[in-house]
Image (tube, rainbow, N blue to C red):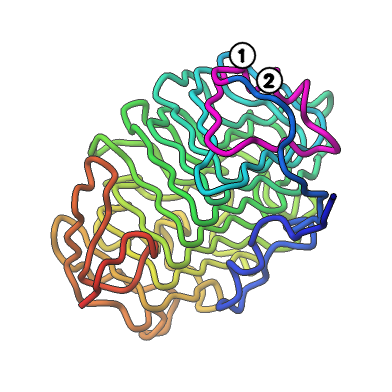
Amino acid sequence: MKKSFIFGAALMLMGALSFQSCTKADNPSVPREPAVAVFDNGMELADAIAKFAKDGVLYLPEGIELTMDKQIELAQPLYIVCEGKKPAFISATAGIVTNSTLSFENVDIDATELKEPFIQLATLNNADPVKLDLIAFINSTITGLKYQFIYANKQPYLVDCINIQKSVIGIDGSKKKTTFDFNGGGNVAFLGIDESTIYSIPTVANNGGFFSSQSGKEVTDLGGTTQTFAISNSTLYNIANGKTVNTLRKNSQAYQKFAVKNSVIVNCGKSGQFLKGLNAGQAGKDTNWEVEGNCFNWGGEVIAEQKIGSADDNIKNSIDKVVEFADAEKGNFTQQQTSAGDPRWIANAQ
C-alpha cells in the first residue's frame, strides 16, 4: 500500500538559522512503497531505472549491490531510495547527466574509478535560463571522488536547492576539481550542508575548490532573488587547502547570505580565511553573515578567523579546541574535543 512522506530534510537544515531555506521544491511528497522488484547483484543502475522506476521513484532493496558503468541520461525527476538499515551500494565508473530533480537516499557509492563528474547537468538547446528544483544527497556516502560532485556543464541552470543531509562526500583531491562546479554556467539559490562530512584525500595544498560560479551568471540573472550557503553541524576537512574556498560571479551582494554554525572546519581554505573564502575572499557586509559555535583549526592549531563584515562580534562563540581526528587520512573523523561537527564523529566530547 502506498503512503505519502516528505522526502528529504532541507527545511530541518535551516531550522536554527534565520536565513531563508529552500522553497517548497525541497520536500515534495512522493509515493513510497517497499521495493518488490527482483534485483540481481551487479545489475546496472541504468537498467534498474529503465525496468523498475515508477512515478519517478526507484526503490532499492536493502544491501543490493549495483554498478554504474553506463552513463545515465535523465530527462525527468528521479528519486533513488533504499529502505532498511543496510544501504544500497553502487560501484561507479560513469556518471549521471540530468536536467531535472535528482535525489539519493541511503546509498553508498564507490567513485574511485569514476572518470567524469558524478552529476552533470544536461546541455540545453538555447541560452534561456532553466530552473532545476532539487539535487539531494541524504544519508548517503560517496568516496574516492576525483571529479566534480555536481558540474553545471557551463549551462544556465538555476538550481533552487542543493541539499546534503547526514551524508559523507570523500574527495580524492589529485585532479584538483571543484566540488560544486558552476563555473561559466548557472548558479545555485541554496546550498545546504547539514550533519555531514566533506573531506579531501590525499592532503595536497592545491586541491580543487568548494564552489565556483566564476564567469557564470548571477542568481538574479537567472530569475532568482536570494542566494544562501549554509553549513551546520558538519565536519569539513582539507577542502580547498591553501586556496580561496569559493570563486563567485559576484560577492558581498545584498541577496547573498553565508551561515556557518556548530561545525568543525579543519585545514580548509587559507589559514584564518575560511569564512571570507566563502565570500570569494571578501569580508562582505554584516548582513551577509551568521556565524556561531564553530571550531576552526589550521595546521594543528586553533586559528582565529579574520574579521567578516564591519562588526567585531560577527564570529560568535568559536570553540577554542584543537581537534584530534581518529584517522582523517582514512576518512575516520571521530573526535572527543568538541560537540560541534557531524554528529556521527562525536565521541564523549569533553
Identify the mark nearer the N-term, 2 or 1.
Answer: 2
Which residue was labeled with disc 2? Answer: 46
Tell me where residue 60 appears, x and y as whole percent: 65, 35
| SS assignment at label 2 | helix
Q: Badge 2: few (under 14), some or many (20 or more) residues near its Cα, within 10 Å?
A: some
Proximity of marks 2 and 1: CB atoms separated by less than 8 Å = yes
As drawn, is 347 to the left or to the right of 76?
left
Q: Residue at x 41, y 81 (%)?
A: 314
Q: Kindly indicate the quadrant of the structure image that contains residue 131.
A: top right
Q: Is residue 61 magenta?
A: yes
Q: Residue at x 15, y 55 (%)?
A: 299
Q: Residue at x 56, y 58 (%)?
A: 192
Tell me where residue 69 appears, x and y as whole percent: 56, 14
| SS assignment at label 1 | loop
Magenta-colored span: 41-68
Which residue was labeled with disc 1? Answer: 70
Q: Badge 1: few (under 14), some or many (20 or more) residues near its Cα, within 10 Å?
A: some
Q: Kindly indicate the quadrant of the structure image that contains residue 34.
A: top right
The residues tagged by marks 2 and 1 sit, at their Cα atoms, a distance apart of 7 Å
The quarter of the image holding the C terminus is bottom left
Amino acid type, mark 2: Ala
**Residue 129 vertical position relative to residue 311 in the rendered view, above or below:** above
